[in-house]
Image (cartoon, rainbow, N blue to C red):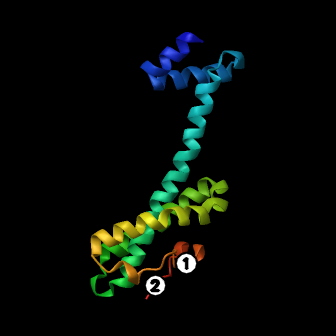
Amino acid sequence: MGTNVELYHQDFHAWINSQIDLLRQGRVQELDRELLIEELEDVVNSHRDELISRLIVLIAHLLKWQFQPEHRSSSWRGSIIEQRIQIERNIDLNPSLKPFLNDAITDAYPTALRIVYKETKLNKSIFPNECPYLEQELLDEDYWPN
């Protein structure tokens, strides 16, 4: 097991392949259980992080779309469309993220607001304290706030 831990630190790809080989051979006693658990947790967290990251961009662009209608651009439109597609894809590939979506929106909103404040220089008081968009609206490709 010591050599597997060393391999983990020296060549992650080779370590993963060694863990796969051990699983395929049914040699579960030889697995680096703790490291494997950590890596699997990291995979789960990375899917959540990607969802939040996509929501940050989506919400920021929707806020700019709504609160700066005179600056609407094809770039904003393209980003909104892209984020919606990627969020939908992420949830389709990982359906267990769906129940986490409202929490992810709540987590994403403050960062989206920071981005909007810095980019637009608009008065902070014009923006709601909580995300003004419902989950369904965020994912609805036909929803464009006025």
Under tag 1, what secondary structure? helix
Amino acid at dot 2: Pro
Circles 2 and 1 in contact, beta carbons < 8 Å: yes
Q: Quadrant of the C terminus?
A: bottom left
- Residue 48, position in %: x, y? 55, 52
Dot 1 corresponds to which residue? 137
Amino acid at dot 1: Glu
Q: Around disc 1, counting alpha carbons within 10 Å, would you say few (fewer than 14), some (14 to 19), or many (20 or more)?
A: few
* Distance Cα–Cα, label 2 vs label 1: 9 Å
Q: Is residue 75 above or below residue 4?
A: below
Say if residue 92 shows up in the picture: yes
Q: Around disc 2, counting alpha carbons within 10 Å, would you say few (fewer than 14), some (14 to 19), or many (20 or more)?
A: some
Under tag 2, what secondary structure? loop
Q: Quadrant of the N terminus?
A: top right
- Residue 111, position in %: x, y? 42, 63
Residue shown at 58% from the left, 73% from the top: 135
